[in-house]
Image (cartoon, helix red, strand yellow):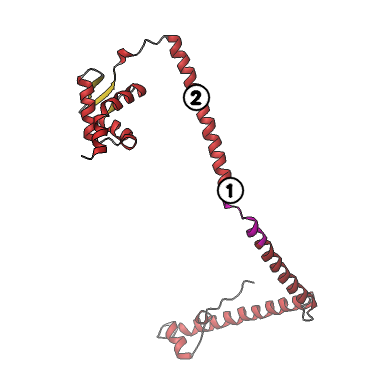
């Protein structure tokens, strides 16, 4: 055992007694070890030994809780508390609880505000963004200017003519496809092979072969 650990073990009974009296609530040896290990550098064996020593000396109480030993301060050393004092403590607890909740809410608001601020653009980043947007807008303005200056605009009449021709050709496409389908169906009634074999032998190519689809009317 190192010198520091030995000194901590020697002072363990005093540390644990003071801790149990201040907290005034039951703890297992593992609880006490976990709570005081970092602050005082106490090993678990030293904690167990000190608690058993204090219990044997009558300075603290020891009780079995299932298979586990529980240690707590001797309640006889504390003065009796009146009902009025208890009510006062309850009121204080309520007030402190409300204060804690208020502080927690304030912390959440500040954390949200901090998150918003840290995610916002800095002034140099904002200036750079503005310059990039101005450059982008200038490009759009130039494109719009060129479009307006062009002489190859399609007039509404020309557009309407294109739509009419499209409708005419689609109508003819639909008509011829129906005629071809009816004719091939009539031939296939007496044809000994499959439709696919017939198309291959005759050299018929369908819309589906070229992944095209007749537009809706």
Residue 205 position in % (x across, y down): 51, 85
Please give the name of the residue rendered at 46% of the width and 83% of the height, measured from the top-left corner. 188
Name the quadrant containing residue 18.
top left
What kind of element bears circle 2? helix
Is there any visible trace of residue 63 in the rendered image? no
- In the picture, the disc for residue 96 is 2
Is there any visible trace of residue 173 in the rendered image? yes
Of 12 and 34, which appears nearest the observer? 12
Of 137 and 210, which appears nearest the observer? 137
Q: Is residue 98 above or below residue 90?
A: below
Task: Please check the rendered image and state whether residue 119 is part of the magenta-colored stretch, yes or no.
Answer: yes
Pointer 1 with pointer 2, Cβ within 8 A: no
Look at the image and give the residue range highlighted in magenta. Answer: 118-127
- Chief secondary structure of the magenta portion: helix
Q: Earlier in the sequence, mark 1 or mark 2?
A: 2
Q: Is residue 163 above or below residue 93?
A: below
Q: Residues within 10 Å of mark 2 (few under 14, many from 20)?
A: few
Direction front: furthest residue: 3
Q: Relative to 19, is 217 on the left or the right?
A: right
Q: Relative to 198, is 215 on the left or the right?
A: right
Q: Relative to 84, is 140 on the left or the right?
A: right
Q: Relative to 108, is 163 on the left or the right?
A: right
- In the picture, the disc for residue 116 is 1
- The N terminus appears in which quarter of the rendering? top left
Q: Residues within 10 Å of mark 1 (few under 14, many from 20)?
A: few
Please give the name of the residue rendered at 71% of the width and 71% of the height, measured from the top-left corner. 139
Name the quadrant containing residue 144.
bottom right
């Amino acid at each position: 055992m190192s010198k520091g650990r030995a000194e901590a073990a020697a002072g363990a009974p005093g540390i644990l007694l003071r801790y149990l009296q201040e907290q005034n609530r039951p703890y297992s040896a593992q609880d006490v070890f976990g709570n005081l290990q970092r602050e005082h550098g106490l090993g678990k064996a030293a904690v167990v030994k000190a608690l058993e020593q204090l219990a044997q000396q009558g300075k603290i109480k020891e009780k079995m809780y299932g298979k586990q030993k529980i240690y707590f301060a001797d309640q006889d050393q504390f003065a009796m508390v009146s009902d009025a004092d208890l009510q006062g403590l309850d009121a204080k607890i309520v007030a402190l609880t409300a204060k804690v909740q208020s502080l927690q809410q304030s912390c959440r608001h500040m954390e949200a505000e901090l998150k918003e601020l840290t995610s916002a653009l800095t002034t140099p980043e904002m200036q750079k963004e503005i310059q990039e947007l101005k450059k982008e807008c200038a490009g759009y303005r130039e494109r719009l200017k060129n479009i307006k200056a062009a002489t190859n605009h399609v007039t509404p009449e020309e557009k309407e003519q294109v739509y009419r021709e499209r409708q005419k050709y689609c109508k003819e496409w639909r008509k011829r496809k129906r005629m071809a389908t009816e004719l091939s169906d009539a031939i296939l009634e007496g044809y000994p092979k499959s439709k696919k074999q017939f198309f291959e032998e005759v050299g018929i190519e369908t819309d589906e072969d070229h992944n095209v689809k007749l537009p809706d009317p």
